[in-house]
Every structure is written in structure tokens, then in C-alpha cells.
Image (spheres, rainbow, N blue to C red):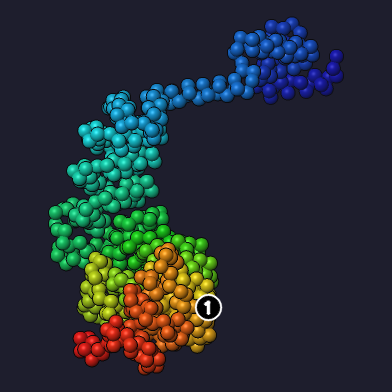
Amino acid sequence: MAPKSQQNSKPKKRKQISGNKGSSHGSNSKKPKFVNNKPSKSPNLGTVGKPFKPPREKENRHFKSKVEKTEAQKDNLVPTTNRDRRVQAKELAEARKKKRKRHYDLEHELAHLWEEMRKRDITKEDRSKLISKALENMKGKIPEIAGSHVSSRVLQTCVKHCTDAERETVFEELKPHFLTLACNTYAVHLVKKMLDNASKKQLAVFISSLRGHVASLLRHMVGSLVVEHAYHLANAAQKQTLLQELYSLELQLFKDLVSVKESRLVDIISKLDIQKASVSRHMTSVIQPILEKGIVDHSIIHRVLVEYFTIADKTSAADVIQQLSSSLLVRMIHTRDGSRIGILCIKHGSAKERKKSIKGMKGHMKKIAHEQYASMVLVCIISVVDDTKLIRKVIINELEKDLKELILDKNGRRVLLQLLHPNCSRYFSPDDLSSLNLSIPSLCNKSESGVDRAEEKVECDTSKIKGEVDGSKVSAEGSEVVEGGKKDPLIRRHELLVDSGLAEKLVDICINDAGEILRSNFGREVMYEVATGGADGILQPKLGEKLSALYEVIASLAAEPKSEDAASEDEHVFENFHSSRTIRKLILDCPAFALTLWNKALEGKSKMWARGHSCKIVQAFLESSDSKVREIARVELQSLIDEGVLKIPDTKQSANKS
């Protein structure tokens, strides 16, 4: 027996566990009641009330499970190999998909049909039969299965190759669900394919179904793709319908208030007498969420931003420029309006914002320089930004790696030509020059003495920009780039072109590949500007010796013997269409080159080159404004003049005509 002290302490412990305060039963009822203390069928109990299990019982149970496992393997209930496990896992996945997907069997059947109908060697008749069978199986279920990864692809193929009647059936079935499908990750591709193959009537119906939802769809990462696609395919009136919904609530509710002629926002405001402040507030509420989400790749958004800048006040315009002055700008400048937004951000942004915009283009310079519209942003940067060290580090150093490719490219040469001869109408179209001359009216009014005077100035500046935004032609003679920097343009050009070493590398490439560049359609213009020393003679003081070497190289090419059986690539520079005209211009505008060419290539051979394309080169010596060039050639060319092969230019008549 236990000591009395232990017997006295046990009731207290049992009292805390069992919770029986006033128990008066016998000794058996006074035992502690544990939580897991349940009556056991086993006669042998352990110290804590659990059945006693001998050590061998566990081993026996383990042995028993092994036996059962072996028997199950014999009955093919449990997979033994990895292949069997993969097959079983695939079957389980198929079973789960059948439970989860309502039209799983239909999608499985459509996938087999799709594999057949998209083969390259299938005939049109067989494909038509498969498409008809697939559309028949999907009839009435197209909106439900259009959001599936597989079914969406099948429907795209069917819509592309089906008949007009079948396409009309699919369109009518999808028409009530266009807005829902436009926001689906997979169905959006089906909607775009429907628009690509839609008739004019179907496209008009689809655009009308977007009424009231354009702004909300543009805020959606997937839905904005559909709006952009519809905007790209729409005609002028339909584009205006989509844009007006983003301008004002009045235009959204009453779509017939404005005709197609009033395409610009300032014209709409003046015609309907809408308050400019209310339109600006509404457009701000539309634009800000789109910019915050970074959805800036679409041309419809670029157009809205260009129109917004024409009416925005100073604070609102500065806020938008601050938001766009980052890596977002690189994603916008590939369109015409996006390029103009980039130019406006560069010209009106602060030094910090310009730096962020330029750094955001790092690594993309080659692609930007080769694009039609994006290259104009680079032209604006080298014409406006005063931080030449940043431009040399980010832009010039990256472009130098592909300098020859830039020279021979239609758009890539623009940056080089802007440094050599800024704003030249020979190399930039009137539309290009007008885009460089764009400005934001509210940010141009730095000093405002009164409200009326400011409004008058805004209207004046806005009317100046209207034609540019609308794409109307502006004469090249009256287009002058609005300088945004304080540095002298000539000093800026010298730092970017000469001090950076770009000009020296440019001359070296022209020397090494003179024949190829002269014969090319676009490279010959760069060659001409380099050979003449650029505007204001910017290359002459430092690179005069290298330019003389360039003249020698061109003269050596011209001194090569005339070959009648030469291919077009190796055609003589005097007979090639592009090179012969470039050499003629150099004779007229660069006396040093003309003297070198005559002494090395033409002296004693002028009669041989006095016919064909080359006759213009020989004639140019008589038309030169330099007396030395005329005198050195007149003695030998006099016989050709007497024979009537060449004509003395009548300077008086040409002066009177001009």
C-alpha cells in the first residue's frame, strides 16, 4: 500500500481532472477519468488504460500489409511500374476534368477534328466538311466553350475557313456575349479573328455593341486589345465614335451631335459650346487609370492623349508628362501619335524627366532608330536636350555599333542626317518637320497677364497645332523646330557629332565602303553630307584630311575602267543611277572634290563619259559655281561643246526663271 500522504493527495488530483466536486462513491469511482479512457474489450490493460500490444503484433500487421499488397498487385489494383503509374495518373486527371468541365467530351472531339482540319496538305473540300461537322457539334454551345483554351483555337480555325453563312451563324450566336468574351484570356483571340473576317455590317454591329463600355474595356489588360483591334479596322466615322466616348459624357449619350468633319476635339468643343474644363475633367478621369495600369501600347490611347494635350491645363499636362517620362514612353513611340507624344514629353519635360525618358530607351536604340515614327523621337532628343554627355552615353555609343546599317537604312539615317544637316526638307517630309514643331499650348504660356489674354493665346497656339494633330501638310520652309534647350544648337551638334568621335567613325565607314554607300538609295545622301562637310562646315576644321582621303577614294572608283558586262551591284559609279547623281551634286557643291575627281578620273577621258547617266557628271563641271572648276574643264570640254554633245548652261535664263 502507498503511504497515507499519497492517498491524501490522490483525491485532489482526481478532483481537478474529473471535475466531480461532491463524489461520495466507493474506491472504484474515485479513480481519475482520462480523456481517452474508454472501455476496452481487451482483458489486458496498460498503466494508462490502453490495450497492451505485444511487439510482435506490429510486425505481424506489417507482414500482413505486404501480403495484401502482393495480392493487390496480382489483381492489377496497384501499379507496379512507372508507366502504369503515369497511365493511372492520366486516367485520374481525365476523370477530374470530366467532373470539372461540362463539355469535356465535346472539347476532346473538337481537338481531334482540329488536328485534321489544320493540316497543310488537306484539300478545301475535306476541310470544309470537318469545319461543318465541328460547327454542327458546337451549335448552341459556342459562348460556353469559347473561353476554353482548346475550343477557342478550334473556333478560330473554323471562322477563318468557313463560309459566309456559317460565319454569320457564329456571329449571331456570339453577339450577346461580345463584352464578356472580350475580357477572357482565350476568347479574346476568337473575337479578334471574328473582326478580321467580319463584313462591314458585322464590324458596324460590333462597334455599336461597345457603346458605353469603351473606357472600361481600355482599363482592362485583355479587353483593351479588342478595342484597339476594332479601332484599327474601323473607318473614319467609326473611329470618331469610339474616340468621342472618351471625350465627354454628352458625346457618349448623344452620338449624332457631331459629324465626321469635326474630327478634332477643339472643333467639337467650339461647335457644341461644351465647357473645356468639364471635358478636361472627364478625360482626366478616363486617362489616369489607364496610365496607372501601364496600358499605353494602343494607338487609340495615343490619339486620345494627343487630343488631351490640346485642351489640358498646365498642371494636368505636366502630370501626364511626369507619368509618361519613364520606360512607358518606349512602348508608345512606335505609332504616329505615340511618336508625337514622345516629342512633346521631351520638349516640355524637366531635365529630370528627360533623363528618365532617355534612360528608359537604353538597350532599344537600334530598334527605335529603324522605326519610321520612333526615329523622330531620337531626332528630337539630339535637337533639344542639352545634356550631351547623357546622349553620348546612352544613344551615340549604342548607335555606333551598327553605324553602317544605319547609313543604309531609310529611317536609321535620319539621326545622322539631323546632326549633319538639321531640319533639311530634302531628308524630312513636311509631316516629319511639323511633328518636330509640335508644342503643348498650356505649357507654352509661361507668362500670363490676364485670363482673356491667356485664352486668346491658347486659341492661337491651338489653331496652330490643329493641322499638325490632324495630319494636314505644313510647308517645310516655314517649319522650324521649337528649341527646348538653352544651349546653342551649333555647339550641341559639335559636341554630339565631332567631340564624341561619331563623325570620325562616319568618315571611316564612308571611306571603307564608298562604292556600296554611293550606289545605295539612302546611303548616298549620308555620303553627300559627309563629303561636303555638313551644314555650316561642321566637319571641316577637325576632319579636313580625312575628307580629302574620301575624295581620293571616290575618284579612284570613278577612275576604274568602264565595264559593259558588269552586274548591277558592280556597276560603274558614273553609270549607276544613284551614284552618278550624287557625284554630280558633289561637283556642284564641293569644289575640292570636283578638282580631285577631274585630275584623277576625268582628265583626258571626258569624251568617253559624255553619254548616258555619266553625261550629267561631265556637264556639271560647266555648271559649277566655282570658277576654278569651270576653267580646268573648259579646255577639254570645248570640243564636245562644238560638236553639240554638251551645252553651255545659260545662267542668265536660269536666273530669270528662278
Q: Of 338 and 179, which appears nearest the observer?
A: 338
Q: Is residue 9 visible?
A: yes
Q: Relative to 576, does residue 624 appear above or below in the rendering?
A: below
* Residue occupying the point 46% across, 71% down: 515
Q: Is residue 485 visible?
A: no
Q: Of 252 and 306, which appears nearest the observer?
A: 306
* Residue occupying the point 35% across, 55% down: 298
Q: Is residue 279 left or right of residue 86?
A: left
Residue, disc 1: 504
Residue 618: horizontal and vertical position, in percent?
36, 82
Q: Is residue 40 left or right of residue 250?
A: right
* Residue occupying the point 43% across, 85% down: 603
Quarter of the image for the N terminus: give it: top right
| Quarter location, residue 197 | top left
| Quarter location, residue 490 | bottom left
Residue 525: horizontal and vertical position, in percent?
39, 74
Q: Of 513 and 283, which appears nearest the observer?
A: 513
Answer few, some or many: residues within 10 Å of disc 1's Cα (few below 14, many 20 plus, some between 14 and 19).
Answer: some
Quarter of the image for the C terminus: give it: bottom left
Residue 176: horizontal and vertical position, in percent?
24, 36
* Residue occupying the point 70% across, 13% down: 66
Q: Relative to 267, does residue 557 appear above or below in the rendering?
A: below
- Does dot 1 land on a helix, a strand or a loop? helix
Residue 17: horizontal and vertical position, in percent?
68, 23
Q: How many numbered marks appear?
A: 1
What's under tag 1, amino acid-wise? Glu
